[in-house]
Each structure stands twice: as structure tokens, then as C-alpha cells.
Image: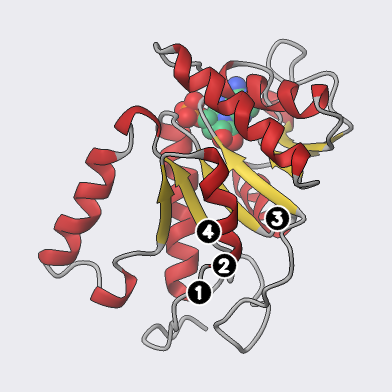
Amino acid sequence: MSSKPSKQSSSRYREQSPLKSICVFCGSNTGMHPEFITTAMDLGKELCNRNIQLIYGGGSTGLMGALANSVLEGGGHVTGIIPRGLATPEVAHQKIQRMELVDTMHQRKMLMHEYSDALIALPGGYGTFEELLEAITWLQLGLSLKPVGLLNIRGYYDPLLKQFDRSRSEGFIRPEFGNLVVSSTLVKDLIPRLQSTTLPHSTFWNVD
Ligand code: AMP
């Protein structure tokens, strides 16, 4: 990792202020089943209902596009952050209120993190996995005090959650970090749970 978010507080516990902006990682493809798209759109509506801004990767395709369009249709606010090299008219969303161009993927992820109060992964591919796992790692290291959730639509993330259990039982994930991710199958459930979750007391890691 060439860059990292700044430490926000000496406390490991997040202040319970309302979430104002949420970063969503999700596929640049739609996936095969319509439920992936409808859930991305439901999440967009839920963000609008709760007056929460969307922060995302700025794409117009796949679940990214469906989510951003749903927020725009609901009258919400969308910020996209995209590396210059990806910012072609075919790939970058042309209608969101704010698009920030950055030089590298690392800058993008750092800004997405910085602008958000919480992070959510919908189904996606390598890009989404990478973003999700980096967010979890930053939480484990205490570099971030922002809750991380995932929407486990159609059991998409069951194998990954199983892998986390395996890593814990094999001694690669410490027991206290075994449940770092708030996982839900329901859009309506996830945001309140992220709001109320207690973040880990990350005293083991000394990263500075
Ligand atoms: P993937 O899951 O591999 O489709 O990658 C999706 C994630 O990677 C998103 O959360 C984006 O931040 C980033 N990403 C991948 N492809 C694109 C794209 N075409 N436009 C913008 N962001 C993308």
C-alpha cells in the first residue's frame, strides 16, 4: 500500500453520529441474476431515504451504474472518484454531481475512504474484492474507524465469509478480528447495523 488514511482519533470507538456518506464498492458488471441489479437500486433508494450521499468509483457500467442512477433518480447526491486513465466517456458516469479525477488507484481508494463514514460492498469481481479486503485490513490495523459492511445477495459472499471463519480457526485471523464485517442479506437492515456497530479495539497492532 503506497498511501494510507490518516488516523482519526486516539479512541478505537467510533462516535455514534449519523452516517452522512457511504462508499459502495460493487461490480463494473451486473452479474447474471436480476436480483443483483434490483438490490443495487434498492440500496440507492435507501441512501436517498436516509439522506446519505453516495461515494463510489465513478463508473457508469454494471452495478456501479445501476446504483448511481438509482441515487440520482431518488434526488440524492453522488460523488465519483476515478483515475484519469479510466475516465473515458464510455466508462465514467456523465451525470453525477461531482466527479474527482485522480492519478492512481491508490489515491482513488484513499479518497473514497476519506469521504465516507462507512463502506459497503455489493457483489462484484476482483476490483470489489480488493477494495473490500483493503477496507477490512485498514479497520483491523486501526488505520480506519469506519464500519465495513457487505450485502450478501443470493449468498454471493458465503464462500468468502466461510474463508474468514477458516482463517480464524487456522490461526491467521485473531479471534477478536473474526467479525470485522457486518454482513446482511437485507438492504434495510444493513445501514442501521453499520450505524450501531462497535469497532474493534485494535491494540495488538502497532503500525506507526
Ligand atoms: P470489479 O468488481 O472487478 O468489477 O471492479 C469494481 C470495482 O473496481 C469498483 O468498486 C470500482 O471502484 C473499480 N472499477 C473497476 N472497473 C471500473 C470501471 N470500469 N470504472 C470505474 N471503476 C471501476
In percent of width and height, residue 119 lies at 58, 51
The residue indicated by pointer 1 is: 198
Where residue 53 sits, quadrant-wise, is top right
- Give whichever of 191, 28 is nearer the camera: 191
Of the two numbered discs 4 and 3 on the same chain, state the one appearing first in sequence: 3
Q: Residue lying farthest left?
A: 170
Calculate the distance from the C-alpha at mark 4 to the C-alpha at mark 1.
10 Å
Of the two numbered discs 3 and 1 on the same chain, state the one appearing first in sequence: 3
Other-residue count near label 2 (Cα within 10 Å), few / some / many at <14 / 14–19 / ≥20: some
How are the residues colored? Answer: secondary structure
The residue indicated by pointer 4 is: 193
Question: Residue shown at 34%/27% (left/top)?
Answer: 154
Question: Residue shown at 66%/20% (left/top)?
Answer: 65
At numbered mark 2, what does the secondary structure look like: helix, strand or loop?
Answer: helix
Calculate the distance from the C-alpha at mark 3 to the C-alpha at mark 1.
17 Å
Evaluate if marks 2 and 4 touch, with contact meaning CB atoms under 8 Å apart: yes
In percent of width and height, residue 172 lies at 19, 67
The residue indicated by pointer 2 is: 196
Q: Is residue 173 above or below residue 25?
A: below
